[in-house]
Image: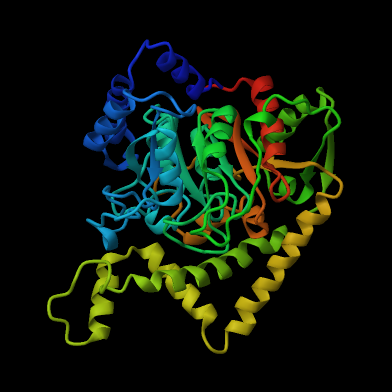
Amino acid sequence: MISKIKVLRELLDNKKVSILELTQEYIEKAKATQKKTNAFTYIAEHEALEAAASADTQEASSPLHGLPYSLKDIISTKGIPTTASSKMLEGYVPTFDATVAERLKASGAILIGKNNCDEFAMGGSNENSAYGVVKNPHNTSKVPGGSSGGSAAAVADGASVFSIGTDTGGSIRQPAAFCGVVGTKVTYGLVPRHGVMAMASSFDTVGPITSSVYDSAVVLDHIAGQSSHDMTSIKGPLGSYVDAIGKSVDGMTIGVPKEYLELLDESMKTTIMSSLDLLKAKGATIKVVSLPQTKHALSTYYILVPAEASSNMSRYDGLRYGPTVTEPKNLEELYLANRTNGLGDEVKRRILLGSFVLSHGYYDAYYLQAQKVRTLIIQDFANAFKDVDVIAGPVTPSVAFDIGGKKDPMDLYKEDVFTIPASCAGIPGMSIPVSSKGGLPIGLQLLAPQQGEGRLFTVASMLEELIGFSL
């Protein structure tokens, strides 16, 4: 896959196009994408053009200087609406930038808009937005994946050089797979979460969605690292992820979980194994490994994450955020009216589920047990990584499905079966496109131990070079 950052950097450095001209071009693409895929909740035309004109007068300070990008609409941006794709935050304009937005602004990148997503990042298909469904750019009757579906669709459709999404249970990797782009879920804490609206604070991660593996490494180089505003962020030095690109895989051992293969149909299994055979030809060893707690990961996740989400969502009470109720009779009426009108069905479902598992009489039976199983999942990966450098497998059970095709929430939850285990363990993962079926992309997932992102970039860049995927 072609690096957009390399191509555009060369054009800008050689003065073949100005930053203002490039920004105008991408804004027009974003407007066209909006009509086709509904990938944006807000296009920051005035703000972007003003920033671009200023950037044209400055010397390039980084590879990202002057490059148009977008942010998932749960990432706070000073002076620019941030709604979490929810009626609850309609009209909300933050007074500060999230750390990731602050760092990208410092790099000289130009923010052109906020990407549509599942409301408060709760969903796996981007059908839960108050601003309407996002559509897959490869086939607009299909979902783009979620919750960072708008981000993946914008990058895949050429409306954004890169985007920043969030991944709690697969929300970067799954839409990247469905849209045929590269999505990187980082080690928990690698990228600060300050200013990012929380869903599940012990699971949430922030990472790039790009058109190539190289681009992902460049962006991650600029957004990773400790922040005094996020006490869970990882201390440095972290090194450069770009340095891991292009290294040999000779001598590396790549594990394939047998539990993942057992859940795949033959065509998807063949695609995954054929891709890994290319690495084998380059000197890598392919080894079947076992992650026995895989069967418990979904239920563990859907106990712990709603529990944390129900706590985090308590701030949206109609007093500080949300539409106000005229002269409510009491506090209960205020809460009821505000949350009934301001929140969508999936958000309400998770709040209710989370409140239930945390309630008296059920906390020990559900929440504490799920925490114990989470520890076992972490141990599964730790044991596997004693024998392998990287774990490879599918991102999703199938290619992108029809919009409206999965009415039962449980069917949607099952789409996360391959992404959730890594989320429970807090390890990094990456989705890269390796093939297609019926005109829709198929992604391969790579996983590494905590802070093992360098291994992911080494293996992914080699696969990218060998496969040369395009759609």
Q: Quadrant of the N terminus?
A: top right
Residue located 43% across and 39% down the image:
104
Asked whether the viewer can see residue 399, the reply is: no
Residue located 59% across and 44% down the image:
396
Choose top left, top right, bottom left or bottom right for residue 36: top left
* Residue 256 horizontal side relative to residue 165, left or right: right
Outermost residue, left direction? Answer: 326
The location of residue 108, given as percent across then percent down, is: 40, 32
Q: Is residue 326 above or below residue 97?
A: below
What is the tally of numbered marks visible in this picture? Answer: 0
The location of residue 228, given as percent across then percent down, is: 52, 58
Choose top left, top right, bottom left or bottom right for residue 465: top right
Asked whether the viewer can see residue 252, the reply is: yes
Question: Which of the two residues, 197 or 169, is positioned nearer the viewer here?
Answer: 197
* Residue 227 horizontal side relative to residue 55, left or right: right
The location of residue 289, given as percent across then percent down, is: 82, 48
Question: Which of the two residues, 351 or 143, is positioned nearer the viewer here?
Answer: 351
Q: Is residue 375 above or below residue 441?
A: below
The location of residue 250, given as percent across then percent down, is: 83, 27
Residue located 62% across and 61% down the image:
298
Question: Which of the two residues, 208 or 372, is positioned nearer the viewer here?
Answer: 208
Q: What sort of colour scheme is used for the picture? A: rainbow
